[in-house]
Amino acid sequence: MRTTGLRAVFAAVLLVLAGCAAPTAAPGGDVSPATPDPDRNGFDDPAQDVLGWENGYWYDEPIAVDQSDGLNDSEMEAFVARGMARVEHIRELEFDERVPVSVISRDDYRSANAGGSGSSDSEFNRWNDQVWEALFIAGESTGSASAISATTGSSVLGFYSPSDGEIKIVTDSPGEPTIDNATLIHELVHAVQDQRFDLTDARFRSETQDGDLATDGVIEGDASYVERQYSERCAAGTWDCVATPDTENSRGGNPNLGVLITIYQPYSDGPVYVHDLYERGGWEAVNDALRNPPASTEQTIHVTDESPRPISFADEGTNGWTTFPDQGVEGSDTVGEASMFAMFWYQARTSGAETVRVQSIADTNSRYDTYNYDAEPSNGWANDRLFPYRNAAGAEADYGYVWVTEWDTDGDAREFRDAYLNVLSAHDAAQRDDGIYVVEDGPFNDAFRVVRTGDRVVIVNGPTPADVDEIRPGLAS
């Protein structure tokens, strides 16, 4: 996922907010297995490879695995093989080959992912800083790369890398490794997705934040949907499941909840989206969605196929202000409805902004949903393009942005504008006679112009009011 610096991996992420518990899915039905030759692994002989049987283990048979003192090699082999068989049985997809599983310490994981995409001074990170600053999630004093790596370093439980074809479990005890059942199942789903649909394919990569989250809606939604069905079988005693010992963990850290709420959206709305597909067309409908992923988080939040409205934009910057033409889509990002919701929720929680009711995130209406990303200020999204700007004329570069947002109706645009102005108000913004708002102090101290014209809202940001007028001249408040 580009937003997290995990663009080439698919991870299991833990998110728990006070008073919000994740629901579980109902189990599917079991079927009687066929009987392959137990001495054949089946990978090189399709006639010997049947759903629900892998490397000599059936999906419903007990295994002699005890994690109380960590997993030895034979236990790991049995645990993974039966997990693969169980994924096959639920998901109705056959593995083509064994999936290697290894462990990595959380400290090593944090070190490997520190700084996000490239160095903290990379052009991408300078561009991406403006995206997350526009969302009032990562301010100038933090930087997007630091906020993202600190958050994922604390929340990722394990990940699958399509480039390596391998699962890595993030653990605090690599010398005596233990693996949570649900995390293993989740990552094994990614492995079979990769073997069947090639997760390295271009259709699974987007140049925008919203595109990445939308694609992850079906990828992570599929894995989370299967994981929940598996967990329900364990809880009900339908299947014998290997217990995970209680251990101290060092997830801790200092996660940015705005980042976490943003990157968790596919894990929350994705299972609802996948469940709807499954109800309408079975697993083949889910497979079709993997072949043609959703285009926006609006589609996964509301389970719709409504397409984003095209937005054209011409750079009008003066006096040295330019876009980043080599980043994103012609210099722009699209943050989408999920990220806008995260902005309003995070600012309500941290700054007391009158945007959304903080506890509304727990108001879910589906047993497959974890959190609610549907809110008035972000609902009615039709599209957005956020253009970061820079000016390198001085000793140090200055930065700003133009954020063009389109809405289904004038009323939707008005709700977004009013909520955004409430965010500025929460940061003590003062409005000048020319309509520009100025935030004097704090991590978001800048000048802002916010203009609504019908169903469009344009936000221009710069270090000073004069910069705002140079970035987008002639835009009247």
Image: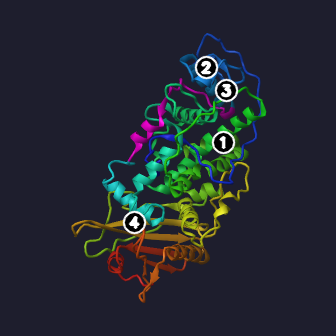
Tag of residue 242? 3
Q: CA distance from mark 4 to mark 1?
A: 35 Å
Q: Amino acid at mark 2?
A: Ala
Mark toward the start of the polypeptide (4 vs 2): 2
Q: What residue would you read off at disc 1?
A: 225
Mark toward the start of the polypeptide (4 vs 1): 1
> Where does the image place residue 34, in percent across and percent down from the top left?
72, 19
Q: Is residue 231 above or below residue 217?
A: above
The mark total stands at 4
At mark 3, the secondary structure is loop
Q: Amino acid at mark 4?
A: Phe
Mark toward the start of the polypeptide (2 vs 3): 2
Q: What residue would you read off at disc 4?
A: 387
At mark 1, the secondary structure is helix
Which residue is nearer to you in this view: 56 or 423? Answer: 423
Q: Amino acid at mark 3?
A: Val
Mark toward the start of the polypeptide (2 vs 1): 2
